[in-house]
Each structure stands twice: as structure tokens, then as C-alpha cells.
Amino acid sequence: MFDKILIANRGEIACRVIRTARRMGIRTVAVYSEADARAMHVEMADEAVCIGPAPVGESYLRGDAILEVAKRTGAQAIHPGYGFLSENAGFAAACAEAGVVFIGPPIEAIRVMGSKAESKRVMSQADVPLVPGFHGEAQDLETLSAEAERIGYPVLVKASAGGGGKGMRVVRAAGEFADAVAGAKREAKAAFGDDSVLLEKYLGRPRHVEIQVFCDTHGNGVYLFERDCSIQRRHQKVIEEAPAPALPDDLRRRMGEAAVAAAKAVNYVGAGTVEFLYEDGGFYFIEMNTRLQVEHPVTEKITGQDLVEWQLRVAAGGVLPLMQDQLTRRGHAFEARLYAEDPQREFLPAIGKLVRLRPPAENEHVRVDTGVREGDEVTMFYDPMIAKLIVWDEDRDAALRRLRVALAAYEVVGVTTNVAFLGAIAGHPAFRAVEIDTGFIERHRADLLPPPAPVPDRGLAIAALSVLLRRNADTRKARRAASDPWSPWLSASGWRLNDDNHHDLRLMDGDTPRALTLHFRPDGYEIEVEGRPAIRAERVTLDGETLTATIDAVRTRATVVCQGLDLTILSDGAVWRLHLDDPTARAAEQEGGSGRLTAPMPGTVVRVLVEPGQTVEAGAPLMLLEAMKMEHTIKAPAAGTVSAVNFAAGDQVSEGVDLLVLDVAEG
Ligand code: ADP
């Protein structure tokens, strides 16, 4: 076995590999980009070496730099994780040349399986069933359209070098064919530098069922059952499970055997996944991934095996830890991919600081694979996955309940996430009833992505109570020590203290003002929202960010995170965002004093137009910010003097950070 390995990756998978290596007594070397200097995988590894700037082309994809680090640190093997260099035959060859073990399959297997067309040619020779289609070398439109006619519409045009759903087009009728081929070729050329395409019959309601295979260098090959990854958005996996529900056992065995045959046909070694589409009792090979998959933990949960340990053992020349007849499975597992993205804005990646990040507690039922901690930034340089939440229980229903509970408990504040979307899938009756195929999300879109609803009165009440309690605490603290004069919680201005002992408060729910009145009662509070019958709150306490209260006789706990005047309330899976409408703070912003100019959204500073000390007129442009591919100008809200410029061109900024400080001119 190796004494020391290098992990040529970052994020959760790097941390995942390090964990197993450490358990096996193997030392680890991390590589990292300048943006990742304080990343979790860097902290976890025994040694860590910076390999270049943030963009992946200058760091994580630099095979030469990585091999140099391996030599320098004495790492005997390189684990590529997934993505990056994991399926790069050139890198595997460079490792071999440098005398470093590439923890993955032989170069030739990577090369053959890297081409969807070539892999299909090899698979058909090995009698592995294929989706009817065309995967010949001819690429002229005439041949392709004749083949499309032969296959019969709808057909799917796929980039041969494809991955991640790129370069894929569904064509429903002959008239759309030429445009679709041109589009797929353009996308494939841009993404993979290779524009060859293949054609497949487009199946109407397939399930994506994939087989985990493992082979060693001694001629042994096994399958570790299957995973169902039918819950997809734009051909990308969202929730995976193992085993595939309602899959007949003889089919499971036949698919497993076909997958092992597929692996053997290319003299495979190590971990691989053979992907099939499954429809109407038939299954069809679509591709093989020659690496450890993102969703491998569900297989680990049902088999009780550590697949990274298997990889390390096989790469070191060992025999597979278990043979086919020794492999068993138990129970059911799900994995949900938690992303920093905004489902309400076409799932645009979100970036920013993870102001609060509290995963559910891990135990035998719940596992969290993550590469970030509270306080870390999600940047635009890398995949915005925050974590993989994996749950296990004795059967599918019980595991699904665990998934719903764990998702509801997952607390992320600072960046928008898909957690509510994942929760909606996990709670959907059709998902529970195993009415699943790759069209699930599209078909149930309206249920899964409901339009944003107004914050319920209970949420407003929780917000009001937390504002009050925080203000009281701040006032007490301020009396004891010099305080931050800018704390909005210190100013009583959002409040009017009236004769009959009540406070009026305004919260912005998006663009909608919500008015509340909070009455003080001997045993607690009564909160009136827009004239509706009052909500009663008793035994209210605020401990850090946790508010506990008995609201209308129900004991409730919620997390309330304040960032400036913004409140995020997390309560049993629901996330509500509100803004405290404080008239005095607003007036200060408009009239004078010192103004902080904050980033309206996460983005990159394109240009700084002023210097500290410079005087500016009202409306003068101060900074250009690029976000979501659009430029935004930060303008002076009033005349004044720039007293600080906190960022330079090229810097990434998260939403709400202070970009500049302006001393507003008197008068
Ligand atoms: P990629 O490598 O880009 O991820 P795949 O070939 O693995 O592409 O396919 C990804 C997904 O696209 C599948 O899981 C499935 O949902 C869909 N898909 C692929 N081929 C077909 C097909 N012939 N018919 C219907 N859907 C397909």
C-alpha cells in the first residue's frame, strides 16, 4: 500500500478521499489554487501545495504542476477525484511516465470510454445492449439525416466527447434536424474541442439506472449493484438512490453482468460506472464513466463498503476486497446534491459567503460530504455544490422520511440554495410512489417550483420578536461598552414607543411592506399583522441566532440570522427573507454622515473609478461590478468624499459587502 498520495482535486471529493486515506494510515498531499488557500481540503491534508491562480486552467487542470508537486512531496499515487483530470488519458499517461500511480483505469480504457461513439462500438461487440442509434464515423449532414430517418424521430443528437449534458439536442421532427446538429456541434466544439456527434433514439420515459463496477489487476470484476439517478434537471442528476426501486431482481443481475462484461471488454481496472437507460423492461447502455462518481456514497451505504479504500487497494495492486458472491446489500439510501443556486432564477449559480452553515447531525442514518465550512465563500470559479446529503434506512419509505427531515434541518444562510427544491422533490407524492423517470422534474415543475409566497404571519412574528430581543440585548451591551454606532439594532428609530406600550414595525417582504404592531403583555407579547387577529407569543428567548418561543400555544424554535438590516429566518425547512425598514437608517443614507456602499449582488469588480480622498458629485459612477453577465454601476448617492475603496478590479465580492465608503458632504 502507498505511504503517501496526492489528491488532484478540491472540495468535498478531496476531503472525502483524505478521510479514507487517513483511516488507512496513508499520508495525504493536497494541491490548491490561490482562491482555496484556506479551503477545508487544504486544512485536512497532511501537506498542501499551491499550484496557481484561481481559474481551473491555471491550477486544478495543470497536470504538469501537479506531477511536479507529487515528485517534490514524494507522493506515490494521485487520486484525481471526479471532474478536472479524472478522465484525462493524457494526464494518466504523464503519471505513468513520471512513475506515479494514477488511481484510475488504464489509459486505453479511459480513451475508449471517453468517446461515447467509440465506447458504443466496443460495447456492441461485447453484446451489451445499446439504445438504437448511429455511432459511425461519418459526420456529413446527409448521412446523419438519413440515419435519423432510419432510427425514427424523436432522436437525440449527442456530442461524442460529451459530458454534463453539453452538446445534446432532442430533435422531434426532420425539419429541425440540421439546426440541431449544427447547434450540438458548436457546443461540443466549444466545450470539448471535438465536434463529432452521434445519434440515438430518444426514449420517452426512461429511468437512468447505472451500475457500479470494480475490477482489479488480477482479472476479477464485480458489480456493487445499481443506482437510480432518474431525478435530473437538464440531464444533470439532482437526487440519486440505491437500490433502484421496483427493479426486478433478475434484471438487476442481468444489468450487473452486462456492466461487468462492458468493463472487461476494455480491460478495466478500478472503480467505474456503466450507465444505462431503463424503459419498458429493457435496458440500454449509454456511457461508461471511468472514475468514482459523485453519487458513490449511496452505494457505500447499502453495501457497507468504502469505495475509496477499494480504489486505493486496487491501485496498489491488491485483489478486490470482496468477490461477487460475498457482496450483499441492505436497506435504501438517497443522496441529494445541495447547490448554491437560485431555483427561482433558472438555477443560476449563486456565490457569496456562507454566513451560516449548519448541516444536520451525522449518525448511522445521515452522512454529509462537504468541502466547505461556515464562513467560507462559494466562488464563481468552481462548481457551486455545497454538500451531498446522504441518508440511509432499512427501506425506501423510511430513508425518504430521513431525507425530508435532514433537508428541513439543513441551515444555509448567505447564499441562495436549492434546499427547498430538494425538499419539494423528496416530499412529492409521485416520488414517494416511485413514479419516476428522467422527465420527473419537468413534469412536476409547478409543484416543485411554486412562485414565491408572502412570508406567513408566523414568520413575521418571529422576525419582530427577534428584532426586539436583539435590540434589547444590544442596548444592554452598548451601555456596558463602546458600541458600533452603525448597528441598526442600537437605534430605536424603527420603533415608536407609544402610550399603550406597543411598538410599530415595518418589514419589507421583497418589495411589499408588511406592517406589524407588537403589544407588550404581562405574560409576553401580542403581534398584530395588518389588522388580523393577534398572534400570542410567550416565553420568548433569543440565544445567539436561535429564537425560542411559544407561539399561539405551540413551542417553536427558529434560527434568525441578521446581516445589517436583512433578516433570514429558518424554521422547519422554510426560509424567509425580510428587510427591516428603518426610516432613520434610510434618512442617514440619503442625507449625510458616512455612507457605506454595498454590493447589490455577488459579482466581480470590473473597474474602480475613484480613489480614496477624491470628491464626487451626487450620481457620479464609483465602481463597475459584473454580475450574472451584466454590468452594474455603483453611483454616489450624494456628493461627498470617498474615504475608502475596499476592492480592486478583478476582486470577487459577495452580496452586501461594503465596496466603498463615502463621507457625505454637509448641507
Ligand atoms: P452526459 O455524459 O452529457 O451526462 P449521458 O449520455 O450520460 O450524457 O446522458 C445524460 C442523461 O441524458 C441521461 O441520464 C438521460 O436522462 C438523458 N438521455 C441520454 N440519452 C438518452 C436517450 N437516448 N433518450 C432519452 N434520454 C436520454
Image: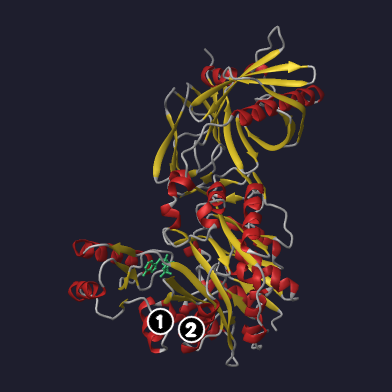
Q: Which label belongs to residue 129?
A: 1
Q: Distance between the residues labelled 2 and 1?
A: 8 Å
Q: Residue at x 67, y 77 (%)?
A: 309
Q: Assign a secondary structure to mark 1.
A: loop
Q: Is residue 102 left or right of residue 436?
A: right
Query: 163 or 627, which lies in front?
Result: 163
Query: 525 or 12, which lies in front?
Result: 525
Residue 275's place in the image compared with 235, above or below, is below
Q: Which residue is drawn at 31% across and 79% down?
A: 135
Q: Do the residues labelled 2 and 1 touch (CB within 8 Å)?
A: yes
Q: Badge 1: how crowded within 10 Å, few (<14), some, or many (20+)?
A: some
**Residue 63's x, y, as percent?**
51, 73
Q: Assign a secondary structure to mark 2.
A: helix
| Ligand 1 sits in quadrant | bottom left
Count of numbered marks:
2
**Residue 412's x, y, as percent?**
62, 46
Q: Residue at x 54, y 26 (%)?
A: 508
Q: In this view, does 279 lie to the left or right of 651?
A: left
**Which residue lies under the disc numbered 2?**
258
Residue 49 shows in this picture? no
**Residue 661's x, y, as percent?**
56, 30
Residue 55's place in the image compared with 600, above or below, is below
Residue 417 shows in this picture? yes
* Residue type, mark 2 in image: Ala
